[in-house]
Image: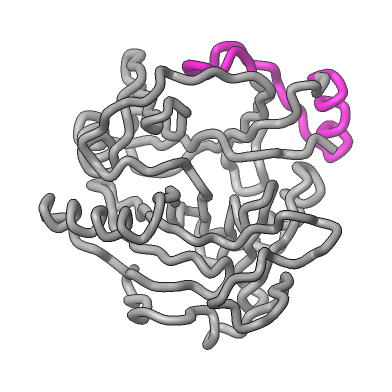
């Protein structure tokens, strides 16, 4: 199967492109790396494309991209994906820095792009906002959490890191504990998009900046159970939930099968498991009902 190696970028539709650009640049701390009509492309301060914005009628996350091996043969990948009843198409210049990609949809209708080549969009930018290190993961609500989880296992080679009960899966395609999350809900929608910060002082600076910008912190700081990341959440003007996090668990050796031991782990070693809902949070404020 064409194994995904890392997440590339997320694509959003927004009814107010200028307002969203302002938030992603001046609050989140991304760089406006390019514009193309009613599209905008945002990168981290080291120049990796992480968010694509399209002007449209509603606010929602429409797509994800994933990097595969640079040695992958697209013809072989098309054949392997085709065995699952899918018909990926080769698209050129899908976004700045991506010369080509294979495009198809997952079961919940999210457009997926698999790419093998990319380039930085500049480097060492100075940013006015938080300035995260990288895009870490994207979480979705979906009515068919088991079907979508199996799709990412079978088609893209993801591995399940943890479950909460039987309704919330955490999946990895590299060392990070999770790159995509799927939680059961009534309709398909974004749950949150998450960016890695450098350390706890960076999280504190992020909270201070949110306060300066009069942006409410929806939840956190909190240390989660699955993944054990320390996280803080806020919403952008469209209502998309954005997480800044540190300390995410790492599976550095798949054959060993446990996450790199850390002092805050209750299980030693920490292995993939099913978490009961009441222990899915280690410390911090309880999640607000509306968050």
Check residue 42 for magenta coloring: no
Q: Looking at this view, is 217 or 112 the one in front?
A: 217
Q: Is residue 6 visible?
A: yes
Which of the colour schemes (rainbow, by chain, secondary structure, one colour) is used? one colour
| Residue pictured at 56% horizontal, 65% vertical | 183
Residue at horizontal 59 percent and vertical 60 percent from the top: 182
Whether residue 61 is situated above or below residue 102 in the rendered picture:
below
What is the x, y in percent for residue 240?
Answer: 34, 51
Residue 87, x across and y down, in percent: 76, 28
Q: Quadrant of the N terminus?
A: top right
Q: Position of residue 7 (x, y in %)?
A: 59, 39
Which residue appears at 69% of the width and 78% of the height?
274
Q: Determine the image quadrant of residue 126.
A: top left
Rendered location of residue 9, percent (x, y) = 50, 34
Please give left or right for residue 285 compared with residue 258 in the image. left
Q: On the rendered structure, is 10 left or right of 124?
A: right
Indicate whether 181 appears above or below 225: above
For the C terminus, which image quadrant? bottom left
Residue 99 counted in the magenta span: yes
Q: Is residue 128 above or below residue 115?
A: below
Report the front residue among 137 and 133. 133
Residue 42 shown left or right of residue 279 in the figure: left
Q: Which residues are magenta?
A: 74-100
Tell me the quarter of the picture where residue 226 sits: bottom right
């Amino acid at each position: 199967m064409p194994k995904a190696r890392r997440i590339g970028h997320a694509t959003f539709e927004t009814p107010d492109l200028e307002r969203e650009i302002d938030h992603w640049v001046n609050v989140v701390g991304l760089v406006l790396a390019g514009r193309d009509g009613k599209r905008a492309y945002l990168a981290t301060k080291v120049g990796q494309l992480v968010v694509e914005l399209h002007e449209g009628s509603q606010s929602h996350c429409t797509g994800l991209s994933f990097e595969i091996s640079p040695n992958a043969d697209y013809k072989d990948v098309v054949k392997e994906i085709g065995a699952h009843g899918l018909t990926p198409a080769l698209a050129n210049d899908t976004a700045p820095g991506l010369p080509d990609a294979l495009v198809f949809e997952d079961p919940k209708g999210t457009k997926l792009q698999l790419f093998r080549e990319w380039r930085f969009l500049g480097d060492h930018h100075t940013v006015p906002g938080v300035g995260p290190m990288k895009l870490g993961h994207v979480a979705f609500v979906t009515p068919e959490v088991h079907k979508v989880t199996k799709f990412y296992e079978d088609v893209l080679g993801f591995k399940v890191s943890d479950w909460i009960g039987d309704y919330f899966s955490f999946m990895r395609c590299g060392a990070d504990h999770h790159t995509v999350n799927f939680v059961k809900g009534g309709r398909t929608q974004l749950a949150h998009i998450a960016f890695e910060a450098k350390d706890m002082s960076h999280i504190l600076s992020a909270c201070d900046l949110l306060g300066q910008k009069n942006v409410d912190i929806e939840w956190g700081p909190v240390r989660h159970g699955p993944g054990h990341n320390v996280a803080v959440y806020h919403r952008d003007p469209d209502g998309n939930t954005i997480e800044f996090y540190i300390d995410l668990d790492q599976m550095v050796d798949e054959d060993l099968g446990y996450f790199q031991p850390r002092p805050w782990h209750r299980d030693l070693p920490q292995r993939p498991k099913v978490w009961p809902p009441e222990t899915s949070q280690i410390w911090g404020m309880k999640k607000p009902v509306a968050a």
